[in-house]
Image (spheres, rainbow, N blue to C red):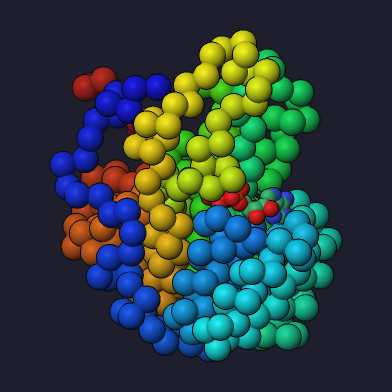
Amino acid sequence: MDPAQFGYSTLPLQHKPYDTILPETLKGANTGKVAFVTGAGQGIGAAIAEALAKSGANVAILDLKLDNLAKTKETCLSHGVKVEDFACDVTDGEKVKEVMDQVEQKLGPIDVLINNAGILDQRPFMMSTFDGFWRQIEVNFKAPLMLIHQILPRMKERGSGCIINIASRSGTVDVPMTLGYVTSKAALIRATHTLQLEMELDGLDPAIHMYALHPGGVLTAMGGAGAAKEVKEKYGDITDEEFYKDLFKDGPPLCGQTCAYLATGRGKELRGFFFDCRQDIAKLLDYGRERLLKENRNTLTVNFIDGYCNEP
Ligand SMILES: NC(=O)c1ccc[n+]([C@@H]2O[C@H](COP(=O)([O-])OP(=O)(O)OC[C@H]3O[C@@H](n4cnc5c(N)ncnc54)[C@H](O)[C@@H]3O)[C@@H](O)[C@H]2O)c1
């Protein structure tokens, strides 16, 4: 892959938390809220849970195993908030409902849902089993939508809520060897745009606000892991250190603090949109919702040749 094919931003990109989203700026801004974070055991999910805790939210943290959550729990507790941890595979709808009920009993109504858990199996479609391909759709798309389906009636009843879907720029581009990933993330972004419009139907826009985010390139168990051995043997290995150092240079707190900021409601004008955490949120807000909508920005779209529009 040649990164230059996508062009380079002329505005500076952020790689770590900046003024608008710094922990000091958001101190106490989410006090009393309850946040629900999936895949919080490591990587970006752990940073999101910590950022929310730092901003005063009580957090429910979920991952496949309780052991995975020990470190995140300890860190969040150190910020003086309440923390409940749950072993829960997010593709298990019954278990998710049970966990949500327990969170509401122990911490109170859920104000913020962060769909962060995700998986990537980097191989060509025809080197995947169909089940292996489909599992990515289940974890990355079905599960977030199932959680939203469970939580929206609760948020609607209270007339407020924030939902953040950790998507990826991979949902906006074609990347060979990642079919399950790119299609699940594209679907998640599209769902975010469409569901926000559905909030208008019930008079719940902007009280219920949703976002789809690209967290940046973050070196985690997933980010920069590369393809499986047999894939590298067949197609060669593009994983040289320089390549990854350049592409995965964003710290997990960039996305974590962005989520804490959005949870406060201060970024509501960006509801329904997809955006990249590396882009300064204050710049997007200055650009203005009306203009973003009018110019079809920050949304999955198609760009036909001049003279052809995408009319119904
Ligand atoms: N790292 C990056 O550069 C990058 C870039 C774009 C998007 N993302 C997205 O960010 C999110 C977090 O990624 P990460 O890099 O921190 O990955 P990671 O692999 O380090 O962490 C993912 C976490 O999700 C958990 N998880 C996986 N399947 C689960 C399931 N079925 N139920 C519950 N928990 C489950 C894992 O146990 C793990 O703790 C993902 O949605 C990913 O697609 C990451």
Residue occupying the point 36% across, 54% down: 277
Residue 36 spot, x, y in % from top left: 62, 70
Residue 5 visible at all: yes
Q: In the rendered view, does 190 fall on the left or right side of 101?
A: left
Residue 142 spot, x, y in % from top left: 68, 47
Quadrant containing the N terminus is top left
Quadrant hosting residue 125: top right
Q: In the rendered view, does 111 fall on the left or right side of 301?
A: right
Q: Residue furthest left?
A: 10
Position of residue 187 relative to residue 178, above or below, is: below
Residue 173 spot, x, y in % from top left: 42, 30
Q: In the rendered view, does 192 fall on the left or right side of 149?
A: left
| Total marks in image | 0
Observer-nearest of 247 and 155? 247
Quadrant hosting residue 116: bottom right
Residue occupying the point 62% across, 62% down: 40
Q: Residue furthest front?
A: 241
Residue 302 spot, x, y in % from top left: 36, 30
Quadrant containing the C terminus is top left
Residue 294 visible at all: no
Position of residue 11 relative to residue 106, above or below, is: above
Quadrant hosting residue 78: bottom right
Observer-nearest of 275 and 85? 85
Residue occupying the point 62% across, 23% down: 123
